[in-house]
């Protein structure tokens, strides 16, 4: 609880702002429930507008969320056409929790980006394969955070709103699920990095 409070104050100071729109409990390990209480308190005080979590699997979600006073607004997890966590999505949908996708492009995996369904749709809509994948995410209702340092790629990542994938095309992409995870951490690791210390404790 105290470490989470310090982390929130440190974030506000670093960002030089009075409030943060969305603040996530990044990994579900340590004293998750006490840390969540600190986020709830900061939300009540107006320091944070919305609070969420990251990397909560179905099992971890069911372990902690029933004990939370506030349901997270967001669960940020690895999600892309090769890694469709359908059971988790169904669980989040029940509570109207937004899924925020990291590695939405499979960490730039060329085998994903060059899948024939994406290259064909890219030709059809005069877009790139990555734009097709990002559009799929948006039409699935996800918050999507692609990363790039390339200015043209950043521009392309926003150029997604002048076309729409059909239901048939969305269903075809859904068949690509392989259960592939580009981050290889286990569920046990997600719950207990004993050697981990917050930045403010290291300094």
Image (cartoon, rainbow, N blue to C red):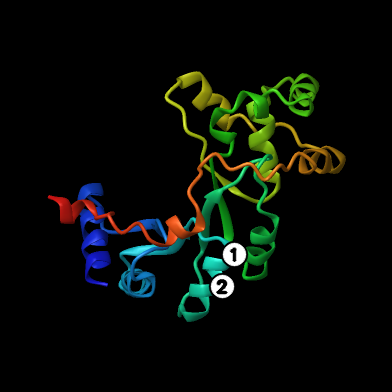
Mark 2 packing: few (<14 Cα in 10 Å), some, or many (20+)? few
**Residue 140 at x, y percent in the picture:** 70, 48
**Residue 147 at x, y percent in the picture:** 47, 33
- Count numbered badges in the picture: 2
Of 159 and 81, which appears nearest the observer?
81
Q: Which residue is mark 2?
A: 62
- Residue at left offset 57%, top offset 25%: 156
- Residue at left offset 77%, top offset 38%: 173
Of 79 and 157, which appears nearest the observer?
79
Q: Which residue is mark 1?
A: 58
Q: Are marks 2 and 1 in contact (CB under 8 Å)?
A: yes
**Image: 36 above or below 8:** below
Please indicate, yes or no, whether residue 188 appears anywhere in the rendered image.
yes
SS at circle 1 = helix
**In the figure, residue 80 lies in which quadrant?**
top right
**Residue 144 at x, y percent in the picture:** 56, 43
- Residue at left offset 58%, top offset 39%: 104
3D distance between C-alphas at marks 2 and 1: 6 Å
Of 59 and 67, which appears nearest the observer?
59
> In which quadrant of the rendered image does the N terminus lie?
bottom left
SS at circle 2 = helix
Of 158 and 141, which appears nearest the observer?
141
Mark 1 packing: few (<14 Cα in 10 Å), some, or many (20+)? some
């Amino acid at each position: 609880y105290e470490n989470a409070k310090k982390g929130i104050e440190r974030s506000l100071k670093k960002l030089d702002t009075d409030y943060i729109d969305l603040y996530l409990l990044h990994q579900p390990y340590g004293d998750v429930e006490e840390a969540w209480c600190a986020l709830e308190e900061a939300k009540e005080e107006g320091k944070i507008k919305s609070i969420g979590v990251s990397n909560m699997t179905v099992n971890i979600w069911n372990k902690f969320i029933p004990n939370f006073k506030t349901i997270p607004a967001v669960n940020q997890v690895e999600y892309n056409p090769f890694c469709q966590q359908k059971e988790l999505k169904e669980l989040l949908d029940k509570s109207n929790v937004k899924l925020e996708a990291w590695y939405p492009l499979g960490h730039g995996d060329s085998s994903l980006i060059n899948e024939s369904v994406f290259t064909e749709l890219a030709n059809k809509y005069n877009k790139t394969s990555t734009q097709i994948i990002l559009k799929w995410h948006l039409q699935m209702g996800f918050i999507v955070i692609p990363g790039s340092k390339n200015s043209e790629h950043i521009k392309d990542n926003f150029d997604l709103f002048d076309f729409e994938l059909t239901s048939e095309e969305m269903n075809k992409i859904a068949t690509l699920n392989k259960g592939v995870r580009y981050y290889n951490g286990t569920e046990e690791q997600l719950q207990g990095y004993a050697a981990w210390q917050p930045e403010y404790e290291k300094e």
